[in-house]
Amino acid sequence: MNLNEEKILIDKAKTDPYTFGILYDFYYKQIFSYVFRRVGNYEIARDITSETFLKAFIKINSFKWQGISISAWFYRIATNEINQFLRAKKYRPSYFHELFSSMPQLTNASNEDTIKERIEQEEQQDQDFIHVQQQLKLLPVKYQEVITLKYFGNKSTNEISVILSKKVGTIKSLLSRGLEKLKKLL
Amino acid sequence: MNSEMEEFMENLHKPQMEETPYEKAFKLALLNSRKSSVIGILLIGFPAIVLFVAIGQAIFNFNILDKAFNNITSHLSLTLRAIIFFILTVGFPIIAVALNMLSITFFNYNRQQKEFNLTFKIRWWNILITLAGGILAAFFLLHLIADSLAGK
């Protein structure tokens, strides 16, 4: 999807919920992968991703096009949600809980447990990844954010600067210092 | 020093994701949430407005509800007016009661234990509307029964 197509879809999504569905289909896996690789828990990643898209869906009318992919906005919401999860002892996705807590079919979907087990098992097999993920959690959040966006979310420095609303220079220095600190821990 | 680390991070094998049934189920729920909330507001809001106006009418003795109803349905026959009045004052609140009850009631059959579980979720807004709708429907229904018994 190019930026022009995306802009048209966003304008349409403000009045037509089903157009938002196209953006959802396109970006769900990317956001879920990013969140899962950072938190390492299937259920929490699922809840955070749901809350991310729910917030985006509710606030789509306030989204202003600035020539940058809407994915940066999704990543920003997801990153804030992850930080909230890391700060709180018990994460409670408020919008999601309010609207969908009464829909057991969402969490009891068939094959859900099998897929969850498969994804978590696959993650366990990547011992290097697990080790990096665990050590990363010991770093301050500002380093975790940039490193995960760069290497788990495959975002460029410019994209990270948009997502985190920080200067490109700041991102580069956070990345460099973060990697140094991570290397010492590994 | 960092280029080594950068290379390591770039080549690190990351867990790959696949489409889950949840992704589709959540999409449906998400996209329909706006529609459901509009229907919810209409079904909850309308009986609530009728209830407040009816209470106001009874207390302050003004006839907004009667006048509005008479103006709108003046060209209709008496039987049709009675049916519409019945639907609005008894039918709508009953629908609101049913929908609000359904939204907080969950059924679950446990095959292993051979149990049928019925759960009610405590959501005060739904409970309040259910009670208000029930009171409203009962009030108008009893009023209609009393009127027919009195032969009005």
Image (tube, coloured by chain):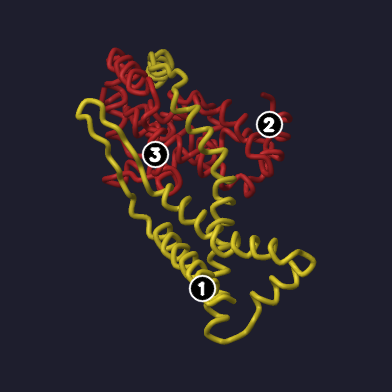
Chain colours: A red, B yellow
Helix, strand or loop at label 2? It is helix
Say which of marks 1 and 2 sits in front: 1
Q: Residue drawn 53% across and 66% down?
A: B48
Q: Which residue is mark 2?
A: A6
Give the letter of the chain under mark 2.
A
Q: Residue drawn 32% across and 27% down?
A: A40
Q: Which residue is mark 1?
A: B149
Nearer the observer, B92 or B122: B92
Q: Which residue is mark 3?
A: A82
Point out the tag, 3 or 2, that comes first from the N-terminus: 2
The residue sitting at the right extreme is B75
Say which of marks 1 and 3 sits in front: 1
Q: Give residue B74's position: percent from left, percent from top.
A: 77, 70
Label 1, label 2: how far apart the Cα atoms are: 66 Å
| Amino acid type assigned to the residue bearing label 2 in the image | Glu
Q: Give residue A124's position: percent from left, percent from top.
A: 28, 17
| Amino acid type assigned to the residue bearing label 1 in the image | Leu
